[in-house]
Amino acid sequence: MEQTPTLVISVGGQSRTLNPTGGPVVLGRDNGSVIPIPDERISRRHLRLEPHPGVGWVSTPAPMAFSTRGSATLRSRWPTG
């Protein structure tokens, strides 16, 4: 089975490399997030990323993620080849 690759998250000039052995991570405004996102349109615990061997990183809304004001988009750039 294929291993899950590392994932690089970049937000507002900050980058963080996530190793799948570290388990799931949460992105959001909360200071305990992997990379805090200082944007009031993003909930405190906005998005959960979980490594899945053979699949890659799977994103799901974190609990309470639908309490955002307005709307915001988290964009990803995936390798194409």
Image (cartoon, rainbow, N blue to C red):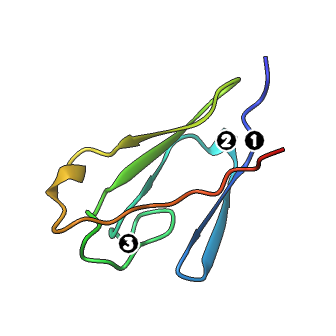
Marker disc for residue 20: 2
Q: Quadrant of the C terminus?
A: top right
**Nearer to us: label 2 or label 1:** 1
Marker disc for residue 5: 1
Numbered disc 3: secondary structure: loop
Look at label 2 and name its amino acid.
Pro
Residue pictured at 33% horizontal, 68% vertical: 30
Residue nearer the viewer, 45 or 74: 74
Total numbered badges shown on the rendered structure: 3
Q: Residues within 10 Å of mark 2 (few under 14, many from 20)?
A: many
Q: Quadrant of residue 2?
A: top right
Is 3 left or right of 69, judged from the image as shown? right
Q: Quadrant of the N terminus?
A: top right
Position above or below: 8 against 79: below
Numbered disc 2: secondary structure: helix
Position above or below: 1 against 22: above
Q: Position of residue 55 (x, y in %)?
A: 65, 26
Residue nearer the viewer, 31 or 71: 71
Residue nearer the viewer, 76 or 4: 76
Residue pictured at 72% horizontal, 34% vertical: 4
Look at label 1 and name its amino acid.
Pro
Residue pictured at 77% horizontal, 29% vertical: 3
